[in-house]
Each structure stands twice: as C-alpha cells, then as structure tokens.
Amino acid sequence: MPSTIAAFDRMGEENAFAVLARATELGRQGRDIINLGIGQPDFATPPNVVEAAVRALRDGHHGYTPATGILPLREALAADLHRRLGVTVSPDNIAVVPGGKVTMFAAILMFGEPGVEIVYPDPGFPIYRSMIEFTGATPVPLPMREANGFAFSAEEALALLGPRTRLVILNSPANPTGGVTPKAEVDAFVAGLERFPEVAVLSDEIYGQMTYDGLAHTSLLAYPSLRDRLIMLDGWSKTYAMTGWRMGYAVWPDGLIDRLRKLAVNCWSCVNAPAQWAGIEALTGPQDAVHAMVAEFDRRRRVVVEGLNALPGVSCATPKGAFYAFPNIAATGWRAKPLAAALLETAGVATIGGPDFGVHGEGYIRLSYADSIPNIRRALERMGEFLANTTPS
C-alpha cells in the first residue's frame, strides 16, 4: 500500500461527532436524549451578524476572495486584537480559514514529519494527536493534571522539550477540561523556551473570551520574544455562536504566512465571501450577545459543578474557562468510556469519555454545559439515578 494512503490509517477522529450521530439516531427512535456531548453553543448567531451576511449576498459578494481573507476583515481582526489584548498585529500576518481545525492541520503539517516530536496537551482536543500521527511525527503528551487545575505546568512542559522537538501545542482556556493557565505559568514557560530557539508554538485560544471568576485570558501574542515562531489560533465559532459558518483565523509569523497562503491556494482557495463580511460585523458590531452568552455559561457552570459533586462517586473541579466540565468518575467504579456509553444508551444523557481526549483522560468524562439549565438539571438527575441503581460493567 502506498505510504500516502497508509498515512490516512494513522489519522484519528473526534468522537464527539460519533456521539452526536448516535444521540441523533436515538432521538429519531423516539428517545428523549439530553446532549451534553457536543461542544457547540446553544445560542443563535447574533441577528446583526446574520443580516450582514444577507446584505453581502445582496450586494454581490459572490466570488472568490484573496486566499488569506479580504483585507477589511483582516484589518478588523488586527483592530480587535489590539482592543482586547493590547497587541499590535499586522493584517498581513493574519489568515482567515474555514474553521479552527484548518490552522491545526496546517501548523502540524508544516512541522510534523518522521523523526521529530510534537508536544501537545493531554487530555486535549483529539485532533492534535490525530494530525501529529498523520504526519509521522512522534506525539509527546503534556499532562493536564486535575491537581494543577488542569492548567499546564511550565516546568513539566519544558522538561519534555529536546533536540527532536519541533512544535509545542498549548490550549488555554482548554477543551475538554475548562482549565485556564495562570499568567505566571505562561511567563515561566516563555522564559524557559528561550533555551529552545528552534521550537515553534501553536497557541489554541479559541475560548479566549470565555473565562470566569475574574480571570483574564493570557494570550501568547503578548510575548514579543515568541512572535517569530508563534501561531495563534482563534475564530468565531465559540465566541459568536457561529460553529456552522466555518470561520477561523490565525496570526502567523513572517516566515510562515506565505506558506499558509500557498496551502490555501492548493486546498480551499478562500473562505466563503459573505461569511467574511459577517465576520467583520461580529467583530465591529455590538458585543452584548457575547457578554450575555458568557454570563449564561457562568450560571450553568455553577449549576453543573454543584450537581456533579452531589452525584455518588463523582467529584468535579470548577472549570475556569470554556463551557466544559471534566468530572472525576474514578470512585464510581466505572471506566470512562463504558460509563459514557451507558449514560447515553440507558439514561439518555450524551457525554464524552475522557480517553477520547488522550491517555490521561481515563477516570473522567466531559460534559458540555452549552445547554439550558433545565436540561442540565434533568441530565444530572438522570445521571444520579443511573449511578445509584446500576452496577459498573
């Protein structure tokens, strides 16, 4: 079998979509399913953003655009980054892509090859490891430990770097744990990275506007020493409830942005034109919907954490960002994936088993609290009844 075909056999998947498909099928069969599995806001895209796309269609924005995105959108992104993070970024270093995964794919493809190592968070977004293995590189998991608030440890991260390391992937606020890495830890990591000038960094900051308890998001863009080897990933999907619009972007260093442009020309040509005009409106229009959504997620967060900690054999650290809870279920006697499967099939609650996010995910399941408080309460009640009346298998 040709090696290029064999590489696809190394590619993994994101099991949340498999759980979504099964939950949907059970729903078609008449089952009442509460889906806390998929990481998708249950809010509608703000009306002003939708209207901007409609207006763009009516105004004739039907054709190809530049491969890295229209200039007005890249200028709006640069202005937004300056407003939110106090950083100066040139629009020429920004690439608009069809979803956040595209940046992951491109960055890992650029640095991954047999014989090199790529460090990634574990538990973490499953596409990181999937793409690393696809390229033939060696995946090196960086443990995200509950005892550390599911933040990464600078000391532990730096200890994993060596002569074969080409890329480090970081994610804060984090999926699936909701962990937020404190600024002091980021400071220590950046300082230590000076000993490894050949190592690039992919910083996944897609949940950067979803933090709680007064915590501020620390962007790696704020560190000038990293700019020549940093790829910062963000997008519209989570912040503006635009998952189906497939709109992401990244800030690339001078030495890589043209390589990304060439990949775009060869692969996706450009992002949907009307969606880009909607993206401008999302960034420059009223932000009330964003603030309201995050405030509601905060209310749900409190409900889900309190409810999980009341379940037999379950304990849940309070997530500091994103919209996920990652409860520890080890004391229930269940292994994570069988428990997640049983909760769906028997109790009608969709969750994701921790091992779907990495080798360090055993003993945990992920719940998304991107659902209504009444549904969350019903799901917790069903989970409690199930755990109280079902023997682990």
Image: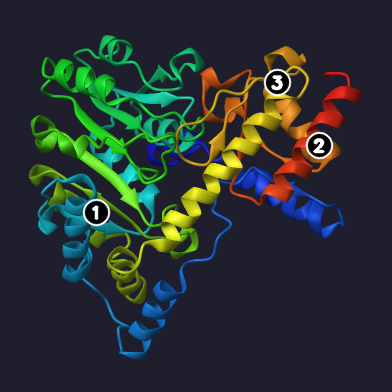
Residue located beneath label 1 in the image: 263
Instruction: From the top left corner, tell me how far across and down residue 372 is, in percent.
Output: 66, 52
The answer to whether the residues at label 1 and label 2 have Cβ atoms under 8 Å apart is: no
Residue located beneath label 3 in the image: 314
Q: Secondary structure at mark 1?
A: helix
Q: Secondary structure at mark 3?
A: loop
Q: Residue furthest right?
A: 389
Instruction: From the top left corner, tell me how far across and down residue 382 is, in percent.
Output: 82, 37
Numbered label attached to residue 140? none
Amino acid type of the residue tagged 2 in the rendering: Glu
> Gap in Å between the C-alphas at discs 1 and 3?
46 Å
- Is residue 210 toward the left or the right of residue 216 in the image? right
> Gap in Å between the C-alphas at discs 1 and 2?
49 Å
Identify the residue at image location x=72%, y=12%.
331
Pick the front one: 261 or 9 = 261
Q: In this rendering, is residue 60 above or below 94?
A: below
**Lower sequence index among marks 1 and 2:** 1
Q: In this rendering, is residue 287 above or below 378?
A: below
Residue located beneath label 2 in the image: 381
> Gap in Å between the C-alphas at discs 3 and 2?
13 Å
**Lower sequence index among marks 1 and 3:** 1
- Is residue 313 toward the left or the right of residue 360 in the image? right
